[in-house]
Image (cartoon, grey):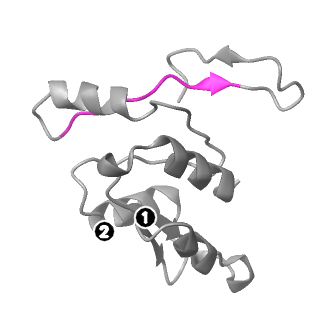
Amino acid sequence: HISATMASVLTFTPPEILHEILFVDDGNDPEFEFHAQLRALDPRIRVHRNAERQGLIRSKVIGAALITSPVLIFMEPHCIVQRHWLEPLLEQLAAYKEHNTLVMPILDIIPETNFAEYRTANHHIG
């Protein structure tokens, strides 16, 4: 899933608007280490490894403190983006001048049992 996520982000994000990608490894066992493979995909990819498990929220806070981009997007490894996924989000952010603005895309649901059944999620899901 990680390679599909990264492949879609790198394929469908214009390079001029993608500053960096940071993965946070939350103290996983060394056998699950994938740092070298990720860095080999693109030089903008960095990996931060927590020395010990911190949990999801704390890991996101740690990651947010490590980025240098003015926009922060959290993604999960099972997400795959499509063409023009980022531009509408950035347009919404640009409409607000405050630094505490949150925008969120509409998620699509593709059931594991039937990939042909494709629908948009309720706007409260995400």
Q: Which mark is residue 121?
A: none
* In contact (CB < 8 Å): disc 1 and disc 2: yes
In the foreground, 52 or 102: 102
Residue 116: horizontal and vertical position, in percent? 83, 20
Dominant SS of magenta comes to loop
Residue 104: horizontal and vertical position, in percent? 40, 29
According to the picture, the residue beneath numbered tag 1 turns out to be 22
Residue 39: horizontal and vertical position, in percent? 52, 74
In terms of sequence position, does the residue under pointer 1 or pointer 2 come before the other?
1
Region in magenta? 100-109
Residue 12: horizontal and vertical position, in percent? 50, 41
Q: Which mark is residue 66?
A: 2
Kindly identify the amino acid type of the residue bearing the numbered disc 2. Leu
In the figure, residue 13 lies in which quadrant? top left
Kindly identify the amino acid type of the residue bearing the numbered disc 1. Leu
What is the secondary structure assignment of the residue under circle 1?
strand
